[in-house]
Amino acid sequence: MSQVKSVLCVGCTVIDFVTINGSYPKEDTDRRCLDGFWQRGGNASNVSTVLRVLGCKVDFFGMLSRSDAFRVLLDDLCKREIGTKDCPFTERDPPFSSVILAQDSGTRTIIHCNKDYPQTTYEDFSKINLAQYGWVHFEARNTPHTLKMMQSIRDYNQRTGQGIIISLDFETRYEQNQELCAPCDFVVFSKELAGQLGWKTPRQSCVELAAKIPESGPKPVFICPWGSAGAGALDANGNYYEMSSYKQDKVVDTLGAGDSFMAGFIYATLEGQRSLAESVDFANRVASHKITGFGYEHIS
Ligand code: FRU
């Protein structure tokens, strides 16, 4: 990739304990899984992994820990050359997720355990030298601090004439995180959350989201990945595009498919020379390929 500027992914990193099952287990039964593994997970953490696999320079910014249990996450970040130089540390044990993969349905069920693990603050973020980044990607969480982080990038762009791109991965807590959309260039909104809000299609979701942005400012591009139905994208001028997914014969592991979509979109857009529709199509391709194998390594 010719791009010299790095991507900064802001969010959390967790341990994913994954079991592979023929079918989803019945409640209150005791059974053995077919196989299992653990890996570094978390939305921004997975986006960093896939961007590295695709060949981008990436830094991760999130709360790291000095606890023994966290060592495996630090080792993996280091092994993959994902920079963590500006991350603060805590002594607390890492968050983790129990993930059930069901082979017959192709589903991934995630039970996340966070125990109020501390989050990074705007003060931590303000120490970062933004000059090295071409793109900063956020998870929709930690709203007041994330808003200030985004605003500081906007101010930095204005002051220096740089054009650092801001993106948001919006998966939870619609009401609380809604205000994070306005300062962004790109917002990727999850199908699961759209469903919870009663939005039936990617087009409806994009339109509803865009309607909430104040008329006074620029509108972000809204993108809604819709699983096997592909993805929709609404640009700032109101043009809507829909791109179908790539059908796969076998679905092996859907954990992190959304994060892979996000990484594919960032990669394709940063590389330049692609229209919005082409970048979304590339993201669809990355996500569709991801689900054909376990983990993220095969994506390259
Ligand atoms: C997948 C994922 C997992 C993690 C969970 C956090 O998108 O990032 O790796 O356990 O979501 O909510």
Image (cartoon, grey):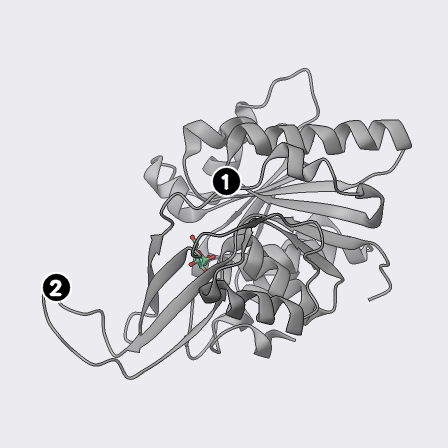
Quarter of the image with the N terminus is: bottom right
Give the number of the disc on residue 78.
Answer: none
Residue at the spot x=57%, y=53% of the render?
44
Residue at the spot x=50%, y=38% of the render?
141
User: Quadrant holding ligand 1?
Assistant: bottom left
Helix, strand or loop at mark 2: loop
Tell me: 70 left or right of 121: left
Task: List the residue tagged with mark 2.
Answer: 27
Residue 79 % position (x, y): 65, 74
Identity, as a three-letter code, of the amino acid under mark 1: Arg
263 up-or-down from 140: above or below: below
Asked if the residue at label 2 sits under 8 Å from ligand 1, the reply is no
Residue 107 % position (x, y): 33, 65
Identity, as a three-letter code, of the amino acid under mark 2: Glu
Residue 220 % position (x, y): 65, 33
Tell me: 288 left or right of 99: right
Number of numbered discs present? 2
Would you identify the image quadrant in which residue 243 lies? Answer: bottom right
Toward the bottom, the furthest residue is 34
Sooner in the amino-acid sequence: mark 2 or mark 1:
2
Q: Distance between the residues labelled 2 and 1?
A: 36 Å
Would you identify the image quadrant in which residue 272 lies? Answer: bottom right
126 up-or-down from 108: above or below: above
Pair 2/1: label in front: 2
Q: For residue 255, say whether it is visible.
A: no
Residue at the spot x=34%, y=53% of the render?
113
Tell me: 244 left or right of 110: right
Quarter of the image with the C terminus is: bottom right
Task: List the residue tagged with mark 1.
Answer: 203
Residue 215 % position (x, y): 64, 17
